[in-house]
Amino acid sequence: MATDKEHLNPFEIAQRQLDEAAKVLELDPALHELLRWPIRELHVTLPVKMDDGTTRIFHGFRVQYNDARGPTKGGIRYHPAETIDTVRALAAWMTWKCAVVDIPLGGAKGGVICNPKELSVGELERLSRAYIRQVGRIIGLEKDVPAPDVYTTPQIMAWMADEYSFLKGYNEFGVITGKPLALGGSAGRGDATARGGIYCLREAAKVLGLDLRGATTAIQGYGNAGSFAHKLGTELLGLKVVAVSDSRGGIYSPTGLEYAQVMAHKEETGSVIGFPGTRPVSNEELLELDITVLVPSALENVIIEANAGRIRAKLSAELANGPTTPEADKILHANGVYVIPDFLCNAGGVTVSYFEMVQNAYDYYWDEEMVHARLDKKMTAAFHAVHAAAQTHNVHNRLAAYLVAVNRVAQAVRLRGWA
Ligand code: GLU
């Protein structure tokens, strides 16, 4: 999908986004250069015994981007197209994400090149344990705390917490978040990414003077973020979701799609496609539908220079990481599309992960009501900080989010005397 002139390397994109913010903030050159690179990264090679008796070698990474504000934090992604530069970009975005919601953590990310859909449960478990045996030396409560991301689950977090506990010789479940409730997980972590994005949408509607009841909505991606956005968008805001998609394609119905029915269909058939009473749409077409709210919830680089001019939504709530390129951002801004940028919009996940770390440290657990109230407070404050920066500097929301986040990280770096 890349045009000849548009560069889609996610890490180069992350660096260019930072460069723009550094210019506005007039960052000291050394401080700017420090923030352009990961502090450290580990490449690991993982031998895994397969069910057929053979051994397969997998490759993985853990990138710790910046820990000026606290231990690094970020998920682990299992994906066949994973690259070190994708992980670097995601780790950079985690740094800005934790800063924009003002939680005392830095940014990191992990990844393993694999296709989890082709692995048995046993193979997945052995791969996950092998990953922890390698990255175990650089993670830890005070160092770096992983979590789920694309194609990783609470069960995988449980195996990883277990393996790490064996390495240490005692239970240390707090080393990882997004765990099942029975192993020190937090109430409200499951839908937290989508919920945080829905709170942002609610606030955006207020500042724009929009009524979102019945607003037509399309959701790209039906994993954890996208499927819960369908559920909570309907329940909390009264959105009318007319289109959803997953990696195999999408469905459209002008009369609206019911979450429980679509989810049941996906659980039964493995995909949303073929849901009765809908017409098929491709993932590309879904983005360009005549709708009010667009929720990109899948992967990076889907809204690019080539299609940005055809986006008709008034609002784009980015639950995915990196769905929009810098060229596309300019086009959306010029066309008046109000973007709630990724590392603000999807920060609900890591915010509740931070709550999980706090609860693990105290060994005392909150109810869902408490988690929702504290998440709402964090997301609402972050949204308005970004909205205010956009007004003050007269810039688009992504640059505004960078200004807020980078400024906070820069302040910590200066105070620590690094640059
Ligand atoms: N993977 C999620 C993200 O991209 C959550 C990270 C976390 O909870 O640490 O924000």
Image: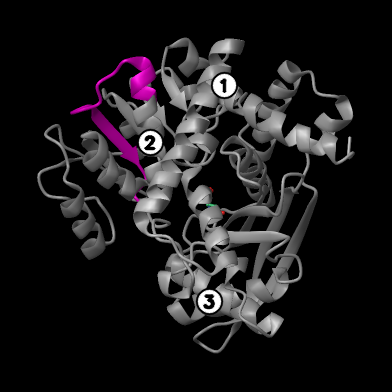
Read off the residue under disc 2. 199
* Label placed on residue 73: none
Q: Secondary structure at mark 1?
A: helix
Please state if 322 lies on the left or on the right of 188 as rendered: right
Q: CA distance from mark 3 to mark 1?
A: 41 Å
Between label 1 and label 2, give the one nearer the viewer. Answer: 2
Magenta residues, as a range? 204-222
N-term mark: 3 or 1: 3
Q: CA distance from mark 2 to mark 3?
A: 32 Å
Residue occupying the point 39% across, 45% down: 373
Asked whether residue 341 is in view, the answer is no
* Label placed on residue 159: 3
Asked whether residue 385 is in view, the answer is yes
Q: Secondary structure at mark 3?
A: helix
Please state if 251 lies on the left or on the right of 103 as rendered: left
Magenta span contains residue 212: yes
Residue type pointed to by label 1: Glu
Q: Secondary structure at mark 2?
A: helix
User: Crowding near pointer 3: few (<14 within 10 Å), some, many (20+)?
Assistant: some
Between label 3 and label 1, give the one nearer the viewer. Answer: 3
Seen in the picture, residue 413 relative to 338 is either above or below; the reply is below
Magenta span contains residue 213: yes
